[in-house]
Image (cartoon, rainbow, N blue to C red):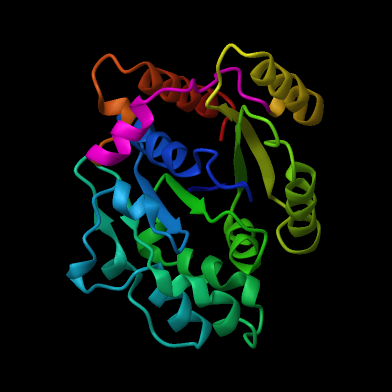
Amino acid sequence: MKIISIANQKGGVAKTTTTMNLAAGLVRKGKSVLCVDFDPQSNLSDYLGYKAQDNLPTISELMMATATMQRTDVGQSIRHNVEGVDYIPSSILLSSADVFLSQVMCREQVLKRILSAPEVQLYDYVLIDCLPSLGILLTNALTASDAVLIPVQAQKFSLDGLAQLAQVIEMVKTQINPQLAICGVLLTMADNTNMSRAVEEALHGMFEDNVFATKIRRSVEAANSTYEHRSLVSRPKSKLGSEYMAVVEELLERGV
């Protein structure tokens, strides 16, 4: 099993769209995939078609229960998407993580304990959609992960904070999780402007071969996809869907 965090502390860089379409693309490649919505805004949960009325635990309740050493049933928290993507949804309760984790021993390892459940170990891939922050939730995600995928929007100021994110990743790797690595940097919302080309060039300078050859173009398709609760890779003749499938191919070729 491989656990991959999709992370960037900047919002609006297509983390959720990337998580959903990588998951759906991996399923099309015959892989079993579990997504974890680790953002209190719950955008991935909505994208996957989650209905909060089912009254089953979300990742928020699992984190709170695990942090206080209560018994949990992770399998009960796993929902099933029509495209074959399994997922654990989030809720606004996760926004209080800094409070309920503040006094917990080894608080950066709570998510890792959840993902060690036998039901989770059966999957080929676990994808964690991280919130736009560098706080304790991101540290939990990185501690639990084998790899990090960083989406970067091809726009002005998109490079701000990337060095800080890389430092956090290196800190977690050095102090907690030595196997952690950056498995790829993905340029999103790319176009034919000088700004987009400048961002791409800067990414190659910072991350070298870790930058995916595939770019995700700017298109209204992405917004339509989230509204329809349907992945881009499932849409016939979708250009963005084809691009995300190419990213999946690159991931598999890298042995991730």
Circle count? 0
Image coordinates for residue 245, horizontal then vertical, percent: 41, 23
179 sits to left or right of 151: right
Q: Quadrant of residue 162?
A: top right
Image coordinates for residue 98, horizontal then vertical, percent: 60, 77
Q: Residue at x 55, y 73 (%)?
A: 110
Tell which of 85 and 124 is nearer to you: 85
Q: Is residue 37 visible?
A: yes
Q: Is residue 27 above or below residue 148?
A: above
Q: Quadrant of the C terminus?
A: top right
Image coordinates for residue 35, horizontal then vertical, percent: 39, 51
Q: Is residue 30 visible?
A: no
Tell which of 61 and 216 is nearer to you: 216
Q: Residue at x 34, y 61 (%)?
A: 89
Assess whether residue 250 is covered by the magenta stretch: no
Furthest-top residue in this view: 192
Magenta segment range? 211-228
Assess whether residue 216 is covered by the magenta stretch: yes
Image coordinates for residue 244, horizontal then vertical, percent: 43, 25
Tell which of 88 and 252 is nearer to you: 88
169 sits to left or right of 256: right
Q: Residue at x 46, y 27 (%)?
A: 248
Q: Quadrant of residue 173?
A: bottom right
Q: Is residue 209 above or below residue 139?
A: above
Tell which of 125 and 202 is nearer to you: 202
Q: Is residue 139 above or below residue 220?
A: below
Q: Quadrant of residue 60?
A: bottom left
Q: Residue at x 81, y 57 (%)?
A: 174
